[in-house]
Image (cartoon, grey):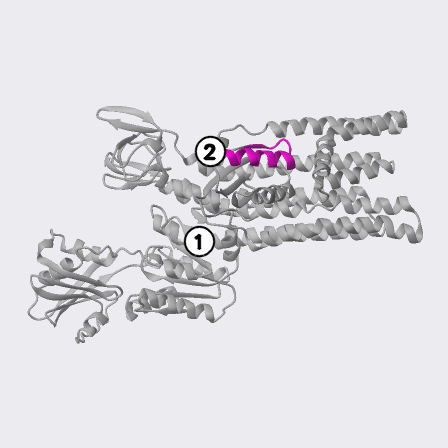
Amino acid sequence: MPPDVSGTTTSCRFALQGLGCASCAGKIEAAVQSLPQVHSAQLNFTAGSLRVDSSGPCQELFREVREIVERFEPGVSVRPWAEAQVLPPGRHIRRQLRRLAGGAGLLGLALLFDEFVSRELAIITYLSSYLICGGSVLLAAAATLRRGGWFDEHLLMSLATIGAIALGEYPEAVAVMLFYLLGEIVQGRAVDHSRRKIAALLTLRPDTANLLEGHQVRVTGPELVEIGQMILVRPGERVPLDGIIVEGESLLDSSALTGEARPRRQVVGDEVLAGMINGAGSLTLRVVRPFAQTTLARIIELVENANENKAETERFITRFAKIYTPLVVLAASLIAVLPPLLVGNWGDWFYRALIFLVVSCPCALVISIPLGFFGGIGRASKQGILIKGGNYLEALAKTGTVIFDKTGTLTRGVFEVRQIFPEEGFSVKGLLELAALAEIDSSHPIAQAIREKYGQKLQRRRISALNEQAGFGISVSIDQRSVLVGNRKLLQQAGLNPESRPESGTVVYVAVDGCYAGALLIADDLREDAVEAIKRLRRLGVARIEMLSGDRQSETERIAGQLQLDGWRAELLPDQKLEVLEQLAAQQHPGQLIMVGDGINDAPVLARADVGVAMGGLGSDVAIEAADVILMTDEPGKLATAIETARLTRRIVWQNIGLAFVVKGAVMSLGLFGLASIWQAIFADVGVALLAVLNSVRIIRG
């Protein structure tokens, strides 16, 4: 029965601590998904998290989830996500290490007894070692049988080892369990290491805030502080909330948020963000947003949720794993039955079938592939690059075309009025005043530059009938005079044809009462790393790099020439940028189409691109919402860094896939012809899984 979605949906998140079975994770997810009140369930094995959208309360759902987890993976602890952050890890690993040491010691004794004492004593010691190493596997297999399941790694491992014991291959049976346990330990530690690396971002969350109440300081939780209240940040403390400095100055370290190594000096009037570390000076801040809406909280939520957007490779491996194990088990069954019926020698063919059972679990793939993408997202976050999912990370690795917006992306977006050209009858000051009054309410960087150049208080009562035309400019009545301030197209609409100026920069034209009054030349410079960013993209093999701009032809051409771009389009309205992007997408250049903008007025084109990248996400909620990838600083070169990380991730993921397929395929082929033993099968299963996991960990360690 489909869930009832007519009521309110509650999103619940749980931590699954000690979850070491990747295939069990998929079964847990499917079982939770089948609950009648559940709309959707997503279990992230690598992160150890389960997110459920349900029509029922989380407390009731928690009990049902705990029962399901206990049924599929006994011993795994289920807790609400918020409570799980402070739990000490490691107890489960220590128990496994004790079992491993005891089992290995007994196996060594058994081999000695077998060689020098007696076979009977050796068998008893072998079986003792087998139970110590594999007792939990046998119990899990029994639970699988009670559920009516068959294609479970615990059950298959149990059948393989019991079969080996039945054939008298005691050392091999114990070795399978011993190395399986070793594999669980190493895999668990590797996955836990990666989880801690990602969770390191969560430690940026301050536990307390110093709330100023008059001349007193009261320590409280950041979530209890309201907008407008004052907080004190002492030297060495982490800033608990986003705020404006009202007293003091200091160097603030934002490296954990942006990847920048150099602290920035912040003074009165500057905004500082939660998660930054204060240097030597005390700061008094006025809080500008509650903790739940701080940039830090948004970043934490984004990174926690990123792994729910799975890469296509991950989805393929998930689908493949569902058919791989049944096919291998079917092959093992046929090998155990059909050849002996034709040629006899039941024991030999049964042994060959056991080899297939040992390699029947796709653990190397179902663990290492998600871990690889998990590590790639974590590595990028340390570099000040937030990627919203493995699907976007995988798309970045296939980048073929990059389209940049010009203003604020390749250029600094910090404009200044360089020259003023009044026509006869108008003064420089008068022309500037008219332009500043017209731009009184505009937040555009060019408008801000005009107001800053004017530098005097503007009288709003002089203005009426202000109308902003997107992509053209502003029409307004100033002192009962009709004024137009904008680009050349705006004046042409009014029947004027001002001369196009050849100067480098953006030209703002002004008309008064139907007469051309003059122009202002406003310039913007390239970002410091823009040229090097383009060179890095070239070295990475990006086929085409183009630029879109609403600026005039001459200025856009000048910037494109400095950067040696493959193409550029100028004087584009916002909807025209979308049309151009559609045209570029239709040309079907090889690779993915990446659009890079500031995330503020580029939302439509960012959404249309295969991957939308917003620059300058630090402090910008709009950028975080609009894009698939957020570069936390104003450095276009970080796009190349993101592509490098994506390609490293893809390379390691496909190394793991190739390793698993080649080794498992080789062992099964050799086993079929009697040229492989269970020892080789152990390596093909546990050994390859270990190598793949350790290879994946290289991503985040690098």
Q: Residue at point 71% right, 48% down? A: 325
Residue 512: name its quadrant: bottom left
Asked if residue 362 shows in the view, the reply is yes
| Distance from Cα at disc 2 to Cα at disc 1 | 26 Å
Q: Nearer the viewer, mark 2 or mark 1?
A: 2
Please tell me whether residue 69 belongs to the stretch shown in magenta.
yes
Per the picture, the main secondary structure of the magenta-coloured stretch is helix
- The residue located at (7%, 63%) in the rendering is 480
Name the amino acid type tagged 1.
Asp
* Residue 84 placement (x, y as % from top left): 50, 32
The amino acid on which the numbered mark 2 sits, given as a three-letter code, is Ala
Residue 73 in view, yes or no: no
In the figure, is residue 35 to the left or right of 335? left
Q: Is residue 598 above or below residue 157?
A: below
Quickly name the residue at label 1.
628
Up-down relation of residue 529 to residue 76 (above or below): below
Q: Residue at x 64, y 45 (%)?
A: 692
Q: Based on the displayed image, in which of its 4 quarters is residue 157 positioned?
A: top right
Q: Could you tell which of marks 2 and 1 lies nearer the N-terminus?
A: 2
Percent of width and height locating residue 166: 86, 36
How far from the left and from the top, in percent, is residue 342? 92, 54
> In the shown orientation, is residue 632 left or right of residue 642?
left
Asked whether 493 or 568 is in front, the reply is 493
Q: Which image quarter: residue 552?
A: bottom left
Q: Element at badge 2? A: helix
Query: Does the segment drawn in magenta span residue 7?
Result: no
Q: Which residue matches tag 2?
A: 82
Q: Which residues are magenta?
A: 59-78
User: Could you tell whether 382 is left or right of 147 in the image?
Assistant: left
Mark 2, Cα crowd under 10 Å, few <14 / some 14-19 / many 20+, is few
Q: Nearer the viewer, residue 408 or 620?
A: 620
